[in-house]
Image: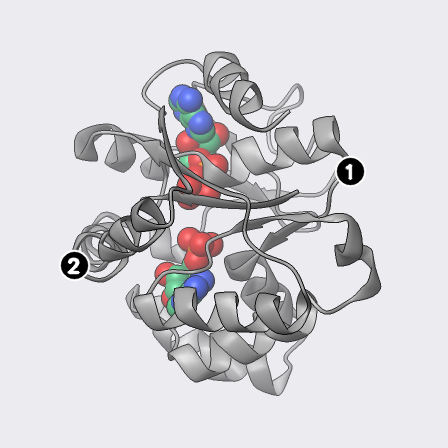
């Protein structure tokens, strides 16, 4: 099963992808996580992405498409994947279809997690991420068992610099202007499923699993 998770920053894509991946036993591939890993490792890719991520703007298509094309060509992707944070532009969506066609594969479903804007801002300002495994937590909606520590790996939790209010507003503007048009691209292919993301984490998971399990 090849599943794409779509939604605004803070909609809960990462949270849901992590749960659904465990249910379906598929790799979870998140473009933002791959960039943050590269930044932590001080690689050339990380340095390239850093300046864009800090401003809340998109990393240029060529760089993202190359990174994701390589990742989805790895052997663990032969049984499927859950892709999150990519595609974010029409050009990325078209490039993804091209790579998949070459591999004799296709996207099965795109899940659009819908959440109102003011809720997104609240979620992002309360988000804490694990430094080691990048699991997202929330100080109210999804707190860790031990404050400041990841439940899964014990890693230290931190707040992303791009979750500051001004950067968040910039990311939401880019989402509306540049990413929303790809919903139409997948709708035309009859692959778009909308899920109400403005409810408890478990309820959202139930809706998603009813579509993909
Ligand atoms: P995205 O990957 O779409 O940017 P995340 O999965 O990181 O979003 O979630 C953003 C924040 O909102 C995190 O702090 C997460 O714990 C919290 N969150 C996720 N889903 C919900 C939900 N259904 N209700 C309330 N908070 C949520
Ligand atoms: P995320 O973790 O998905 O919120 O992404 C964090 C940041 O990484 C974004 O604000 C962008 O700067 C960059 N990024 C992640 N995925 C993409 C993508 N598909 N296209 C362009 N930039 C991306």
Q: Which mark is residue 177?
A: 2
Q: Is residue 68 left or right of residue 172?
A: right
Looking at the picture, does residue 106 appear above or below residue 206? below
Find residue 131 and report its horizontal and vertical position in percent: 64, 50
**Is the C-beta separation of discs 2 and 1 under 8 Å?**
no
Sooner in the amino-acid sequence: mark 2 or mark 1: 1
- Residue nearest the observer in this picture, 77 or 123: 77
Given residues 13 and 94, the one toward you in this image is 94
17 w.r.t. 39: above or below: above
Secondary structure under tag 2 reads helix
On-image quarter of the N terminus: top right
The answer to whether residue 134 is above or below residue 87 is above
Q: Is mark 2 within 8 Å of ligand 2?
A: no
What label sits on residue 140 in the rendered view? none
Ligand 1 is found in which quarter of the picture? top left
Q: Which mark is residue 153?
A: 1
Label 1 crowd (10 A; few <14 / some 14-19 / many >=20) = few
Q: In this rendered view, identify the residue nearer to me: 114 or 48.
A: 114
Percent from the top left, x then y, of residue 65? 50, 75
Q: Residue at x 33, y 38 (%)?
A: 125
Instruction: Kindly tell me whether mark 1's CB lies below 8 Å from ligand 1.
Output: no
- Whether residue 149 can be seen here: no
Name the residue at 50% across, 67% down. 96
Badge 1 element = loop
111 lies left or right of 22: left
């Amino acid at each position: 099963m090849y599943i794409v998770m779509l939604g605004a920053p803070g909609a809960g894509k990462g949270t849901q992808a992590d749960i659904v991946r465990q249910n379906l036993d598929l790799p979870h591939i998140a473009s933002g996580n791959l960039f943050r890993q590269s930044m932590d490792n001080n690689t050339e890719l990380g340095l390239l992405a850093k300046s864009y991520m800090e401003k809340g703007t998109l990393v240029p298509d060529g760089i993202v498409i190359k990174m994701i094309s390589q990742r989805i060509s790895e052997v663990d992707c032969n049984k499927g994947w859950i892709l999150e944070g990519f595609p974010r532009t029409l050009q990325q969506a078209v490039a993804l279809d091209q790579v998949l066609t070459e591999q004799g594969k296709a996207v099965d479903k795109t899940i659009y997690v819908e959440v109102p804007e003011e809720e997104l801002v609240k979620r992002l300002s309360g988000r804490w991420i694990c430094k080691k495994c990048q699991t997202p937590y929330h100080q109210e909606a999804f707190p860790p068992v031990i404050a400041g520590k990841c439940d899964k790996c014990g890693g230290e939790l931190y707040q992303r610099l791009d979750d500051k209010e001004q950067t968040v507003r910039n990311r939401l503007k880019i989402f509306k202007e540049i990413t929303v048009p790809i919903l139409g691209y997948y709708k035309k292919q009859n692959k778009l499923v909308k899920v109400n993301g403005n409810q408890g984490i478990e309820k959202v998971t139930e809706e998603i699993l009813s579509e993909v399990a």
